[in-house]
Image: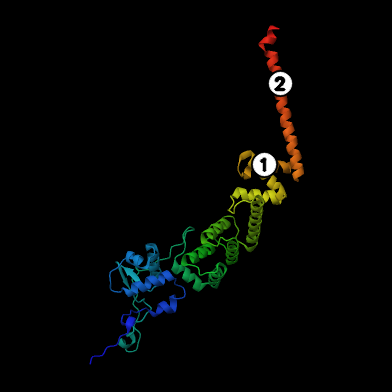
Amino acid sequence: MDYSINLGDWNSVFAVPCSVVDKSLKLAGGVQLKVLLWVLRHSGEDFSAEDISAFLGMDKADVCDAMLYWQETGLITISGGSIKPPSRTENEEPPNAAKETGGQKAAPVSKPAETAVPVKRMLTRPEKPDNAFVAKRINESKEIACLMQSAQEILGRLISNGESATLLMMHDEFGLPSDVIIMLLQYAKSIGKANMRYIEKVAMDWADNGITTHEKAEEMLARLTESRHAWNTVQETLHMPRRAPSAKEEAFAVTWLNSWNFSPEMIREAYDRAVDSTGKFSASYMNKILERWHKNNITTAKEAEQEKMERAASRKKNKTEALTFDIDEYERTSVYDSKG
């Protein structure tokens, strides 16, 4: 009788380096791990980034970034289209070196002068750090590690490698301290804009305007909150559909409510007059009406109605005077008058 052992899926296995678990498992993202497992599974075969991309259903650029990540962590080397384990450095000792030298370590072989280690290029402002550099900064700096952890807690989810790179760029390149970045994340979350594109845009604006301290960030957030509340009041007063205001609309709202101290009733009155005149909502037209009221110290609907009547009477008077003048002028210069 012949015997056999059926191990199922375990009949076909491949090796994963221990360093992947010991050093990289905590920091590597899902994309990097998927690409690495696919590459290890197809060891000894010819394949391309397109093959990996098609199988995993991800962009080719993400595949290339993942391969670069593993190369920069030192797990693999890519040379001439071939993927290989890294070669030993001058400080590493071959496993049998002690035996071959009678228990004495062999003298290290010096590298030729021309094979100097390349210096990492300085990052320019619009360039985000790569995954390996982000991982290095997290390992080296408790502040950066805490920033990444706080970001995940505020956003309520795991952040991607790209998001980690953006946060690090905001800290290292834009010059924003961790506490300022955390304040920005909290604000973005509170207004429903907890996406990294919006956060990066605001962070760049803050850096350009020198908002790089806790105190200045608090002042800016107070202004942003004030503007947001003012616009929300205008929207509710006018029963407008919810939308983001333009910069001019938001500035108008703050002026109407906080500088000129108009009530919602007066803002509604200005809106009705603007629509009657233009047929649509026009913040600029409303602003002209409210600015005139502010200059004339008109603060109630009754005063506004009185002003309206006075303006109408003034226009009627001016029109009558103009018409009378035209008739008198016509009669004075008329051909019948000249024949007299």
Which mark is drawn over residue 273? 1
State the residue lying farthest toward the top: 339
Q: Is residue 278 above or below residue 126?
A: above
| Label disc, if present, on residue 325 of the rendered structure | 2
Q: Is residue 259 visible?
A: no
* Quarter of the image that includes the C terminus: top right
Secondary-structure class at tag 1: helix
Q: Residue at x 34, y 71 (%)?
A: 77
Q: Residue 200 at what x, y percent from top left?
A: 53, 59
Residue ID at (64%, 54%)? 232
Q: Amino acid at mark 1?
A: Arg
Color theme of the render: rainbow
Above or below for 196 versus 74: above
Q: Is residue 294 above or below residue 138?
A: above
Residue 66, x across and y down, in percent: 40, 68
- Identify which residue, 62 or 98, lies in the foreground: 62
Residue 214 placement: quadrant: bottom right
> In the shown orientation, is residue 301 left or right of residue 193?
right
